[in-house]
Image: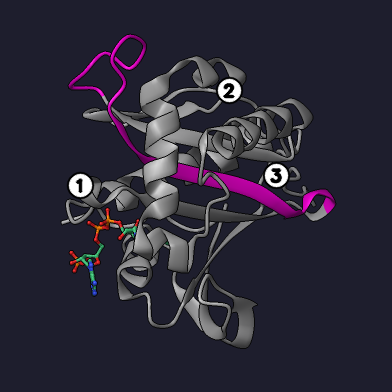
Amino acid sequence: MSTSPAPAVGPRAFTPETLDLGDSLLRPWSRKDIESPVLLQGLMDAAADPQIALWNPLPAADHAAAVTWLEVRDDAWTSGATGTFALLDTAKDPDTDPCFLGTLTVRWTDRSDGLGMIGYWLLPAARGRGLATRAVRTATEWAFRTAGVRRLELAHAVENEASCRVGLRAGFPAEGTLRASYRFGDGEYHDEHLHARLATDPAPAPAA
Ligand SMILES: CC(C)(COP(=O)(O)OP(=O)(O)OC[C@H]1O[C@@H](n2cnc3c(N)ncnc32)[C@H](O)[C@@H]1OP(=O)(O)O)[C@@H](O)C(=O)NCCC(=O)NCCS
């Protein structure tokens, strides 16, 4: 009796690659971005946004903190532990005149087991047009294909309905509610919905 070949397992490392979304791209954050006043200001603006401060607190309140945040992102790419991308609008030249829309992160929660977690936030002007959903779909496919992710989880506070919609539309069914599982930016523990997508799941339906 023949046995099925074991599924291919990638290097279990997140390796920097720019991902094309058509009207925008996901570009790995790096130390080079410290030279961009626009990107540094974008990070500081994001840190000051009430929704990001509540659901995704960002330690980039001032110039020095934003620089440190970028250095940490760059180091995490080097170790393959976490991949963090800037979402940039391609209506402008991302190298000479970056138009910063948001950030997406993929990290290991159990690297040896291929278990990862995805997170994201957008600046207010970029919200409400399906961008987060498309970014999550693209980055998820990349993580399965290149990094050997077996299962990718997505968690959001139950009150964060927009994030719930992103998860569902990106092919991450809800699996349950985690009670008082995470302390958010208001200093309070909130219940979270856990969503997940397996590398073996069928492709999600096209977004409307
Ligand atoms: C969550 C977030 C990334 C969503 O990004 P987005 O690109 O605006 O999402 P989409 O345009 O794909 O919208 C997702 C869905 O949520 C809905 N939605 C948007 N804001 C909503 C709100 N305040 N309440 C309920 N639903 C909302 C949209 O109508 C859309 O619904 P649809 O699927 O029926 O069309 C963005 O709002 C954000 O950055 N918020 C602050 C940080 C954050 O919450 N990060 C996630 C932490 S888990």
* Label 3: few (<14), some (14–19) or many (≥20) C-alpha neighbours in 10 Å: few
Residue at 59% x, 30% y: name it.
67
- Precedes in sequence: disc 2 or disc 3: 3
Mark 1 residue element:
helix
Does the beta carbon of the residue at mark 2 sit less than 8 Å from ligand 1? no
Direction from residue 96 to residue 106 in the image, left or right: right
- State whether residue 7 is above or below residue 76: below
Mark 3 residue element:
loop
- State whether residue 208 is above or below residue 98: below
- State whether residue 110 is above or below residue 176: above
Q: Position of residue 75 (x, y in %)?
A: 73, 29
Look at discs 3 and 1 and give the one toward the viewer.
1
Magenta span: 90-112
Does the beta carbon of the residue at mark 3 sit less than 8 Å from ligand 1? no
Q: Which residue is mark 2?
A: 30
Q: Is residue 103 magenta?
A: yes
Q: Which residue is mark 1?
A: 125
- Precedes in sequence: disc 3 or disc 1: 3
Q: Hey, what amino acid is under mark 2?
A: Ser
Q: CA distance from mark 3 to mark 1?
A: 41 Å
Residue at 51% x, 46% y: name it.
61
Furthest toward the top, the residue is 96
| Residue 52 in view in this figure | yes
Q: Is residue 151 magenta?
A: no
Residue at 17% x, 51% y: name it.
129
* Front one among 171 and 67: 67
Direction from residue 119 to residue 80 in the image, left or right: right
Q: Which residue is mark 3?
A: 7
